[in-house]
Image (cartoon, rainbow, N blue to C red):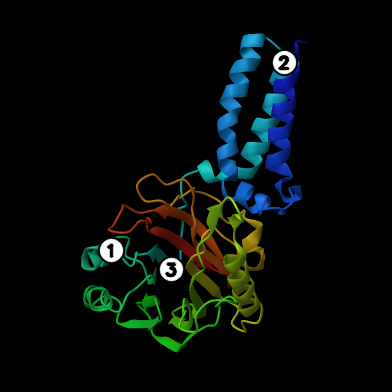
Amino acid sequence: MRRSSYAAVVAAVLLGGLLTFHGAVPNRPGHLGSLLEAFLPWLGLAVPILLGVAVWRRSIPMLISVLVAVVAWLAAFGGQMLPAGGGPADLVAVQHNVSDENPDPAGTARALTQPRPDLIGLEEVTPEALPAYAAVLEAQYPHHTVQGTVGLWSRYPLADARAIDIKPRGLDADWNRGLRAVVQAPGGDIAVYVAHLPSVRIGLRKGFNTAWRDDSAARLGALLATEPIPHVILLGDLNSTVDDRGLRPVSSRLTWASSGFAWSFPARAPIARIDQIMARSATVTGVRALPATGSDHLPIAARIRLHR
């Protein structure tokens, strides 16, 4: 086998290994493990290149190694290529970071009602834009709460609505990006959380800087761990994908849709779903991205079936 063929075999084996054992990649320095996991599906772009080399070289070992990488990618993400589920659901929820620079909050609010959701969770709701959102949504969603810059609108009555403390160390005291409310739905009470975790930054000095995001995720995970109501729904801009180990305090306690990529950011050319709809004692049967609004995020919608 030629030296270049050996290199291609090694590359394919490495690709399959990263897809399967990405958790083994160290997070120091620069949170490289989290950075890899945030964009893990995109490793699949190497497959057609390696496959083309294998065919050109007519190399059976190369072809086998590439097929192993394909199997690894399909095992990790093949289910998300399936259409978003449309089976029976007890609730439909919409999640959207509406952007604090949104030029058309009323139009955005109208767009979010199109899937006829039961719950709408919003982030980056400014005091100036709040009246526009409320005016559009109040007819169909008479029950709502806004805490800081996050809000929840519901078809069903809300109880015990309050802010939650997910503020990481080092941020100002007026930073308020989380809420919890009990939705009194026909199927029973549901604890609904709306959260907006801090943004991450990529720089030369600190690499993939996720410290504040990870701290906030740990605080949110601790609250979820002590939530007494069995049914839980989380709507939020979590600023990473569910594969990112930095979100493990949250993702280890909730489940999410197994079908549909529903990439939500950036809106003009989405490359990842950092907006999430997750649940406990419930199944998120499918998630899909909605058409663009005046935000730099796309809204996402999910169907949710409660466990009895």
Q: Relative to the observer, which residue lies in front, 257 or 24?
A: 24
What's the CA distance linking mark 1 and mark 3? 27 Å
SS category of the residue bearing label 2:
helix
Cα separation, mark 2 vs mark 3, equals 52 Å
Q: Is residue 298 left or right of residue 6?
A: left
Of badges 2 and 3, the one in the foreground is 2
Relative vertical location of residue 111 with respect to residue 41 in this rendering, above or below? below
The kind of secondary structure element at disc 3 is: strand
68 or 151, which is in the foreground?
A: 151
- SS category of the residue bearing label 1: loop
Of residue 16 and residue 75, the one placed in the foreground of this image is 16
The answer to whether the residues at label 2 and label 3 have Cβ atoms under 8 Å apart is: no
Above or below: residue 17 compared with residue 126: above
Q: Quadrant of the N terminus?
A: top right
Please tell me the numbered disc located at residue 102: 1
Measuring from the top left, give residue 107's x and y in whole percent. Answer: 22, 63
* Marked residue nearer the N-terminal end (1 or 2): 2
Residue 183 tag number = none
User: For the residue marked with disc 2, what is the amino acid?
Assistant: Ser
Question: Residue at 43% across / 68% down in the picture?
Answer: 91
